[in-house]
Image (cartoon, rainbow, N blue to C red):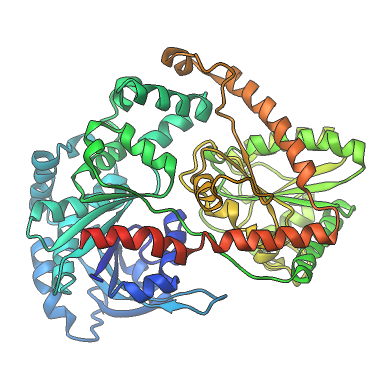
Amino acid sequence: MSTLIHVTHEAVQKVGGIGAVLQGLFTATAYNENIGRSILIGPGDSGTAELLAKTGEILYSSFDGADAGGWAEKFKPVRQRWGAGIIYGRRTFKDRTTGVESHPEVLLIDVGQANLDRLGECKEILYERFGIRSDLYRTWEYEQYVRLAAPGLAALEAIEAAKDQPAVILAHEFMGMPLALAAVAEGSGAYRTAFYAHEVATMRRIVEVHPGHDTMFYNVLARAMEKGKFVEDVFGIQAPFFKHALVSAARFCDAILCVGDRVLSEIKFLGADFAEKRLALVYNGVPAYEVAADDVAQSKDRLQRYTEAILEYRPDFIFSHVTRMALSKGVWRDLKVLWHLEKKFRETGQTGVFFLLSSELGAPRKGHEILDMETRYSWPVGHREGYPDLSGGEADFYVHMQKFNACARQIKVILVNQFGWSRPSCGTKMPADMDFLDIRKGTDIEFGQSIYEPFGIAQLEPLSFGGLCVITNVCGCAGFVEKVTGGREVPNVLVADYTSLPDDGVTLDQVLSIGPRQRGAAEEEESERVAGEILKRLPTDEKARESLIAGGYELASRMSWDVVVRDYLLPVLGDLA
């Protein structure tokens, strides 16, 4: 198949969800067997070059004169015309479990330096051809991807990305759109373009900002679309938001790939133009590991021993939520469910611990900082505001966590605001043989009750290990589960619905007025139902645990990256060829 070009800010290292998608794609056997050539392109500088050298190899760098293959001459016209530094090399992706390895090309453009006259021409094209007013957006987050577009396209031509047949440009989120639009404007037919919608930024902002969150938004979307209304008809002009302008321009691409059913609906909600576009569901994949029950039991034992070390009791059940500390993740809902479960555990005598592994910072706390906090005030049981401990969002959660722990007897909540899950990362109380996979293998429940979640890979990672995954119906992964099970309920996945309204006859204006009171009432009712369902499904003996492990692995196998590539991605790419 033709060359596939991924435009992304995660070309060199995993930063977030797109990085997880790239890891899944590049280590999928179906991808490597069917895609002839892959190129990652994004912004870069000398620091990025150092990262690439650690994760792959440098073939050419304008920063230090490295040139393994005469690339300087090929890139010379690009550098002269655009004044941009260029790094070219390869990055290694490897799945440690399967051993699958790939080495896609990496092309990085230094956008810090730019020929401003040429840049002005690019912005003029964006306005005249696509209606995007760059003068409205005084932010580097917008500017850098506009600067990437034209020199990036020229650099792709220098490495003959579309030599034998049209190459496909996958614009990962709004960041990739300027380059995709440059290819559309160029009009040579050398490229096909597709917007890879990992979310719809316009809708994410509305859901997060509005106090009614998902309870309001998805009811509004359904009723508005029934009346032929779109997002700006209901929520007002969105043009001042630069991400909206770029995402809306996806209507000029040849196809749009949506990672979930809700994303597909949200794309349609952008405007009438999208009714005519090729919209394709391309779910994210879920890791599938075949493990023995004893292996899972060992991981749970490590988690129980860690709990004993910091809380002085050995819990019957381990609950977890591994996530970013972000409003969209809805972590307050976890506490609501846990409180109802706590009251039920008082009757049964069972105990549990909930580990929220989440940090708001962009890098791990240093080892000596963790040891100091552990010594001075028993981190992570106790916390203090300010670096190196609690940031603003972490402190907000800690307030609610303290109240929960003060009132609860059977379940305690622990915030581990650190990257990693090992003794070097998390202090001396953690077992020496603990590693990150233990919190995935050993958990009984993984929470992921997001208010906005285009897919949600992390929520389903414990599936193969028999963990019960609690998600919401707005998560894209819920649609994938429903697809592969034919709508049949499975014991490994519990879907919470915080969008259901008691009266189907409510009007659009009424759902638009939904605020924190109505949402809170919906959350209270649903969290109690979810807690009751959890109590029914928690394994109480070895046979039940083994059944969950077998069922989880079978389900995860049907949602793997190979399945996603074979059944969803390749058919779309075939139509674009």
**Is residue 420 among the parts visible in the rendering?**
no
- Residue 146, position in %: x, y? 21, 50
Residue 28's quadrant in the figure?
A: bottom left
Number of marks in picture: 0
Q: Is residue 486 left or right of residue 156?
A: right
Residue 294's x, y, as percent? 79, 70
Quick check: 150 left or right of 21?
Answer: left
Q: Position of residue 228 (x, y in %)?
A: 30, 23
The residue nearer to you, when weighing 161 against 435, is: 161
Query: Is 273 placed above or below 101 here?
Result: above
- The reply, left or right, for residue 115 in relation to residue 360 is left
Residue at 41% x, 76% y is 92
Q: Which is nearer the eye, 89 or 477?
A: 477
Q: Residue furthest bottom?
A: 69
Q: Is residue 429 above or below residue 477?
A: below
Residue 107 lies in quadrant: bottom left
Residue beneath the point at 70% across and 55% down: 467
Quadrant of image for the C terminus:
bottom left
Location of residue 151 in the rendering, given as x and y in whole percent from the top left corner: 16, 61
Q: Residue at x 45, y 18 (%)?
A: 512
Residue 397 visible (yes or no): yes
Quadrant where the image shows the N terminus: bottom left
Q: Is residue 78 above or below residue 417?
A: below
Q: Splitting the image into 4 quarters, where does residue 274 fall?
A: top left
